[in-house]
Image (cartoon, rainbow, N blue to C red):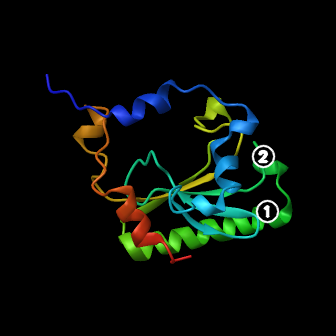
Amino acid sequence: MDILWSPWRYSYIKSEEKPVHDCVFCGIANSPADDEANFVLHRAGRNFVILNIYPYISGHLMVVPYRHLSLLSSSTDEESVEHFDLVKKAEKVIGEVYQPDGINIGMNLGKAAGAGVAGHFHAHVLPRWVGDANFMTAIGQTRTIPEALTDTFDKLKGRF
């Protein structure tokens, strides 16, 4: 049997949900000096765009509100309008940069829905290609990411 090793996933899988003051998104929202280290692509007035550091595929990014909100329905009109304007912009940027066959856009609200950070809602935007979920994912339950996060960051930075 072949074994594919992804040790960087272990700490994520085994981590427990953190209290609000330890929310990864709140920490990033409040640390603009660390934007490059945190892979923040863009800061708007009420939301920011960031790379997913545990991507499903190269180009996987997220749009995150600054305020710690678990439900989309808790956001103000200004927050949600800007949020979805950034999702639309992300769709356009990913299309231009990666030229995918399709794009997934989604939100998982709550732990039962699959949210990795259940207390702070965010939208995922990621490129998809026909055949990108190949035998590695289906049989080996392992994803192959062909591009380093730093390369993805360099491709997308400044496009917002």
In the picture, the disc for residue 141 is none
Disc 2 residue type?
Leu
Which one is earlier in the sequence, the residue at label 2 or at label 1?
A: 2
Q: Report which residue position mark 1 lands on.
A: 79
Seen from the viewer's position, the closer of residues 38 and 117 is 38
Q: Quadrant of the C terminus?
A: bottom right
The answer to whether residue 137 is above or below residue 26 is above
Relative depth, front residue between 54 and 1 = 54
Secondary structure under tag 1 reads helix
* Closer to the camera in the image, 2 or 20: 20
Circles 2 and 1 in contact, beta carbons < 8 Å: yes
- Location of residue 96 (image quadrant): bottom left
Give coordinates of residue 107: x percent, y percent.
Answer: 62, 48
Horizontally, residue 103 falls left or right of residue 23, namely: left
| SS class, disc 2 | loop
Q: Badge 1 local density, few (<14 within 10 Å), some, or many (20+)?
A: some
Count every numbered label the image shows and give the total.
Answer: 2
Give the spatial CA distance, label 2 vs label 1.
11 Å
Where does the image place residue 121, in percent across and percent down from the top left? 69, 47
- In which quarter of the view is residue 110 placed? top right
Q: Amino acid at mark 1?
A: Glu
Q: Position of residue 40 (x, y in %)?
A: 56, 62
| In the depicted structure, whether residue 127 falls above or below residue 95 | above
Looking at the rendering, which quadrant does residue 156 occupy? bottom left
Give the labeled residue for mark 2: 69
Quadrant showing the N terminus: top left
Residue drawn where x is 53% and y is 55% of the image: 38
